[in-house]
Image (tube, rainbow, N blue to C red):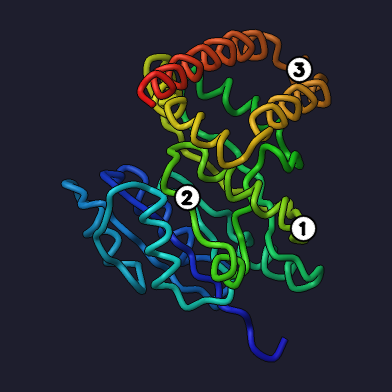
Amino acid sequence: MATRPVVSVVVPTKNVERTMDRCLRSIAGQSWEATELVVIDNFSDDRTFEIAQQYADIAVQAGPERSAQRNLGIEKATGDYILWIDADMVLTPHVLEDAVLAAERTGSTAVFIPEETVGEGFLTACRTLERKCYVGEEMIEAPRLIRRDFFTEHGGFVLTVAGQEDADLRMRLLRSGARMTHIDATILHDEGRLTFGDVMRKRYYYGQSLPAYNDAQPGAIRAQGVATVKAYARGLPTLAGDPIHAVALGGLRVAEAVAYALGAAKATRAR
């Protein structure tokens, strides 16, 4: 390859100094050297922005939400590809190289990169087990490396939803007929020590965006639900190998569904 395509890695941040250094070091240490790091910080009041400035090619402060930050990062980026991650994620060493080479080899617009949850505690172990069932499922996983010209032609992340902006992007890619491919190299998602209260509060908040997401992507919620059931069915051997966390995961998913529904009901009433 005469000229290596440049990957712009866009990272939105806010008060994430616990994971920030490890995240950015993992980007700086990639085997694919043609990279550009763009950090958009939402006016953190800890050391997040200070750490960002040590690593980033472009580091600016702006808000108000993750989608707007990502869109600003894409606007400022100069790479041929955009890879978007959150600041609690760590790239294993060959993610960028494997993703770019896969995209170039197949002529793909986007590349799915599997996530592996890491962290401490019982609920975090449940989430780790859950993600193992999702590998390769296009209606659940996120396409994270995307050709820059897709954003130019189809727009960036939607601002009307919080929590489903990743899924909205995936649906637009699928419905545009964009060619997509998968790699095996993983992104580690450091979710720390999950607590039941934190999970429910987040799902309730995300649920408030579900009506807007359903308006933008009719049928997507049902399709993702069907894909989730199929993923669990396909992952039965994995779940059976860890029955305690599997049973707890089932209960957690029911509770999450209730929190989503309550959030959606609140948003519907407010319309």
Q: Is residue 223 above or below residue 186?
A: above
Circle on res. 241 = 3
Instruction: Estimate how packed mark 2 is, as few (under 14), some (14 to 19) or many (20 or more) residues with alpha carbons within 10 Å.
Output: some
Q: CA distance from mark 2 to mark 1?
A: 19 Å
| Disc nearer the start of the sequence (2/1) | 2
**What's the amino acid at mark 2?**
Val
Q: Are marks 3 and 1 in contact (CB under 8 Å)?
A: no
- Camera-side residue: 166 or 87? 166
Disc 1 secondary structure class: loop
Q: In this rendering, which labeled residue sits more in front, label 3 or label 1?
A: 1
What is the quadrant of the C terminus in the image?
top left
Q: Which residue is mark 2?
A: 158
Residue 31: x percent and y percent?
A: 59, 69
Q: Amino acid at mark 3?
A: Gly
Residue shown at 75%/66% (left/top)? 108
Q: Residue furthest bottom?
A: 2
**Mark linked to residue 177:** 1
Give the CA distance from mark 2 to mark 3.
Answer: 39 Å
